[in-house]
Image: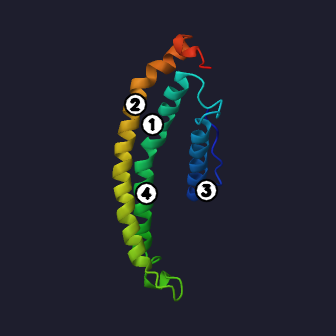
Amino acid sequence: MTRPVPPHLSAAELASEASELIRSAGLATRDGGRPGLLHPADAAEAVGALAGLTAHLPELLDQLASFLSSEQAAGRIGPGTAVADSGFDAVRAARDAREQLYEAGRTAALLSATVSAAAAVLAPLGAARASGGPAASPHV
């Protein structure tokens, strides 16, 4: 199920929407959360979709870090960017966030590889459902 993405949403709004959808998917897999998981093929398809999602995380995290770097280089993040009298150091915060985002990107790449491996192992369950094989029988 691919829905068109509204072109007017910001990166923050899109990330927020993705977060809410993942939270909802988690709720749908809890006991009584039907129709979240009715067949083993549902798990295979969900893991496949998560493989696609996680594949995009490293690039997004790196782009966010690069954006902060370019904004600082352009002078839009500097000593004067602090909230008045708060003691907040915008330059340090941007530097620390960049380091954390780059590290998160490396971790996300490992996550992506691991989820993709799981999706590959489970792919036959989804194929069995499509062909009407044993995965088509729901548990009760």
Residue linked to disc 1? 51
Name the image quarter holding residue 5.
top right
| Image point (59%, 52%), residue name | 14
- Alpha carbon of mark 3 to alpha carbon of mark 4: how far? 16 Å
Residue 19 in percent (x, y) is at: 56, 50
- Mark closer to the observer (4, 2): 2
- Mark closer to the observer (1, 4): 1
Residue linked to disc 3? 13
Q: Are circles 3 and 4 on residues that touch, CB within 8 Å? A: no
Going from N to C along the chain, the mark reached first, 2 or 3, is 3
| Image point (57%, 22%), residue name | 39
Mark 1, secondary structure of its residue: helix
Name the image quarter holding residue 36.
top right
Q: Is residue 102 above or below residue 31?
A: below
- Mark closer to the observer (3, 4): 3
| Image point (59%, 39%), residue name | 25
- Alpha carbon of mark 1 to alpha carbon of mark 4: how far? 20 Å
Identify residue type, mark 3: Glu
- Alpha carbon of mark 1 to alpha carbon of mark 3: how far? 22 Å
Q: Are circles 1 and 3 on residues that touch, CB within 8 Å? A: no
Mark 4, secondary structure of its residue: helix
Label of residue 118 in the image: 2
Tell me the quarter of the image containing the C terminus: top right
Mark 2, secondary structure of its residue: helix
Residue linked to disc 4? 63
Identify residue type, mark 2: Ala
